[in-house]
Structure formats: C-alpha cells, structure tokens
Image (spheres, grey):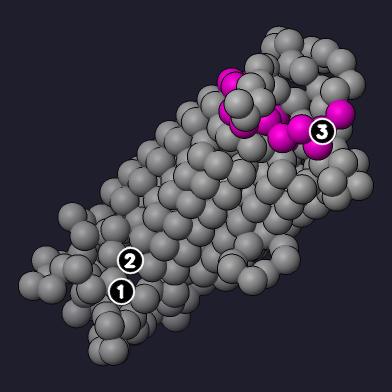
Amino acid sequence: MKVTLAMKPAAKSFIPIEAEAIVPKNFLSGTDLSVWRGNRELGLNEVFTVSVEGDADRAEDVEVVISGADTFRLKRIGEYMDGGKITVLGNIGMHCGNFMSGGTIEIHGNADGWLGREMTGGTIICRGDAADYCASGYRGGRKGMTGGTVEVFGRAGDFLAEHIAGGTVIVHGDAGDMAGAEMHGGTVIVHGNCSRPGANMKEGSCYVYGTAQEMLPTFKKVGVVQHEGRTLIHFTGDIANRGKGNLFVKDFKYLD
C-alpha cells in the first residue's frame, strides 16, 4: 500500500501541526485520521490531498509519502512507529520518530529538533541537516536512544545523541557542542568536527573523524588505533564520571 499525503497550502502557515497519527499501521484501517493545528482538530483530508494505491494487511507493507511546501510544520510524524516506511519529500518538524521501534523514516530535507527522540529501533535517514538533540532524550529525561540507527548526511546541532544508551548514530558532516554527552552505551560517529564530545560519558563509543574542539581534560589518552582505514587517537573516560567509555578522534584541541 502506498499512501500519498500532499499538504494543502494554508493561510496561517506558521502554525505547527501535531501529526502523531501519521504512522503506517494507522492506514490499515483507512484514512479517517485526525491531526491538530493549534487548538483545532482537523481531518486528514482538510490538511492533505490524500490518495491510496494498493492495499496491505500489515504495517510493514505500507509506505506513507508526505510532500508539500509546508512539511516543516509537521510535528511528531512517525511517533511510536513500529513498521513500514515514511518518506518526507522536504523538511520535517520537531520530534519526528519519537519512540520509534521499527520501520524506516527517510527525510529528503532537514529535520528540526529531537529527531529520533528516545527511539528503540528502526532506521531514520535524514538527507539534510538535523537540529539540536538528535537521537537524545527529552529535557529532564535520563535516557535517550536505546536502539536502531539514525543517519544524517548533513550536519547535526548541539547535544547530538545525549544520554544515548544503545543503537548507532552517524553524522556525515559536522556536529555542534556536546555530541555524545552523558553516553551510557551505543555508538556515535561524526565524520566532521564537533566540540566537547563525550562529556560525562559512562559507556559506549564515540568516533570523531575530524577535530574534537575544546577537548575535555577528563579523558585519558590510551594510544593510537586503526579504524576503517583511519588513524585515530583513543581516549577513555569520562574520568569525571568514573566512565569506561571510548572516545576516538582524528585530532583534538584543548580550550585555550
């Protein structure tokens, strides 16, 4: 089954739309779903032009394709998603893939904050940039992503994979400040530069293929290792947290 949702132009295009109902399994029962624009509950066909091709008996066989100039206003797309695929032909709003446990979300543009927040499984592919708190826990929480894969082909913002406890996060560009902060497990890979990676990490592995700016002094240098054809400097820590994590960087600079 292929469900196509083309956003209709809206006069008040600055108002976000809470769209947690848009997950593949919900379309097994039809398209009679609701979303919220501000304090107004709207039927799916009031916000989108909806078309359906084929049928399916399980979520794994459903693909939802979302398009339109205002897709950046859609929040919570794919929340609690457990199978199937969502393709976003543009940018997407905050909290995409919240608590996701299965399936695939592919974003052809940029993603706003908390992409893959506290996800437990599945795959998220972002072809553009991801904003702050990608694959992290929510404010006040103590656990971020625990499983699955998030891959960002652009850059990521601050607090990438904060509190991550499992799974894999890959960023092909630079990341912001505090990548892998409070790590308790899992793997974070940043192909570019970032600052203060692995702060207060307890376990897990963080790889920085570029330069770790403002490198924290609470990491113990172990030596040099080869990783996928790269020569990286290996540190353990964060000693400030009695941590046993592993931080690998191509280069580093301490704060002046």
Q: Which residue is mark 3?
A: 219
Which of label 3 and label 2 is nearer to you? 3
Q: Is residue 140 left or right of residue 66?
A: right
Earlier sequence position, callout 2 versus callout 1: 1
**Amino acid at pointer 2:** Leu
Relative to residue 235, is residue 99 drawn left or right?
left
- Marks 2/1 in contact by CB < 8 Å: the verdict is yes
Residue 84 vs 13, above or below: the answer is above
Residue found farthest to the bottom: 40
Report x, y in % for residue 48. 22, 70
Residue stretch rendered in magenta on the structure: 206-220
Few, some or many residues within 10 Å of mark 1 (<14, 14–19, 20+): many
Q: Is residue 146 above or below residue 215?
A: below
Residue 208 in view in this figure:
no
| Residue 214 vertical position relative to residue 203 in the rendered view, above or below | above
Separation of marks 1 and 3 at Cα, in angstroms: 43 Å
Question: Label 1 belongs to which residue?
Answer: 17
Q: Earlier in the sequence, mark 1 or mark 3?
A: 1
